[in-house]
Amino acid sequence: MTDTLEQLLDTAESAIRLRGYHAVSFRELADDLGIKSASVHYYFRQKEDLGLALVERYKDRFFKTLEPREAQADGLLARVEAFCSVYRDALVGSDRICLCGMLGAESAGLPPALAASVADFFESNVKWLTDTLSEVMTEAEAQCKAVRMVATLQGAMMLASSLKNYGIFDDAAEENLRELKSL
Amino acid sequence: MTDTLEQLLDTAESAIRLRGYHAVSFRELADDLGIKSASVHYYFRQKEDLGLALVERYKDRFFKTLEPREAQADGLLARVEAFCSVYRDALVGSDRICLCGMLGAESAGLPPALAASVADFFESNVKWLTDTLSEVMTEAEAQCKAVRMVATLQGAMMLASSLKNYGIFDDAAEENLRELKSL
DNA sequence: GTCTATAAGATGATAGAC
DNA sequence: GTCTATCATCTTATAGAC
């Protein structure tokens, strides 16, 4: 039996990734856990604090999932494939888009600190890919391709979710890799 | 002086594209227009009706903007560039992401009819690009590239908005076209 | 840690006057 | 068309008991 804090984070992440930050309330999360909303406030004084904790946890998890896959990958293409596979697992494993994809869209309506933490996730993503791709091209070229790849993966999650068809994510992601292979 | 309905649609679209469907209220829209929320209900009985009207108007505007640019474009590449330019103008002209990009992310939390109308926007987008690209490749290949292109444009809007840097959209979009040129 | 109780305000929506 | 008035409900958040 997981403790309440962990259950709370899981439930909140799941709800926000499905419907967005403003569509999720402390009451609803409390109901899901069989507690009262005042108890949710015990863990997170404000909703913003919950959001910040969720994004921090999400970032940690993302890179902790990526690291061993990267270490095991043989060659540039395999490392980029590893990166894409973390995205794919996030989508397919939860039937939800990326937490930061959702919050990134809602950015302008979020508490500034939360929006900044989300932006940091994207910067880290782009940096990781840029560093990886820089092995075989100039850094400027690598950054363009890195930005495009993160944009494609995020957009493909949103599209696949709206159209209720994961094949769409795979089509877009494979197209990404196909281009890299022909390099 | 535009009439109230048009002002209402403009204000609502602007607010939703900035902060999301659930972060926008009838009261807030009424305040922006200097009227009362009961008057907003005169135009749209439910919030869902407003959402539906917004997406319909957005779809119309998108394709009415695209058509003359398509007609004027010379060759496949120019036609795809025309498509991308409608996206770019939507982002840069309003300092906001695509209405359907925002609602697509929030899809699972929206009234089903609204989510369906948003999905239809994406299907139309993919169909237009698939038909265009089919001139020079198989339809299966064209569809993969079409899906990827819409995903990239949508994701790039979200990224550019989160990172507050339009250069990011341009990098991703140009990368899209570069690939097409080398075909 | 979790509860009850409560506050102050927002929200979608309606009835009916002007 | 726009208003006032009102509703039931939800929301974030706090104080203080157990």
Image (cartoon, coloured by chain):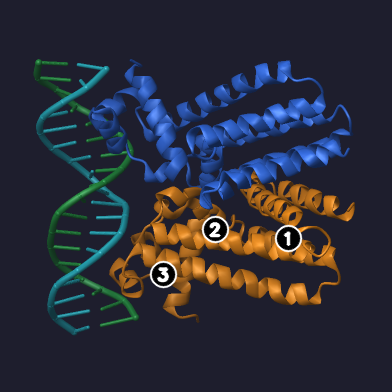
Chain colours: A blue, B orange, C cyan, D green
Residue with the mark numbered 2: B100
The alpha-carbon separation of the residues under discs 2 and 3 comes to 24 Å
Report which residue position mark 3 lands on.
Answer: B33
Depicted B120 relative to depicted A28: above or below: below
Q: Which mark is residue B84?
A: 1
Q: Name the one closer to the observer, A55 or D5.
A: A55
Q: In which quadrant of the rendered view does residue A62 lie?
A: top right
Q: How far across and how far down the image is residue D10, in percent?
A: 26, 46
The three-letter amino acid code for the residue at tag 2 is Cys
The tally of labels here is: 3
In what element is the residue under mark 3? helix
Look at label 1 and name its amino acid. Answer: Cys
Which residue is at a point 39% across and 21% down the rendered structure image?
A6
Q: Is the residue B180 above or below the residue A117 in the image?
A: below
Query: Which residue is located at x 66 percent, y 16 percent?
Result: A68
Q: CA distance from mark 2 to mark 1?
A: 15 Å
Q: Is residue B15 left or right of residue D18?
A: right
Q: Residue at x 59, y 57 (%)?
A: B98
Residue B93 visible? The answer is no
Tag 2, which chain?
Answer: B
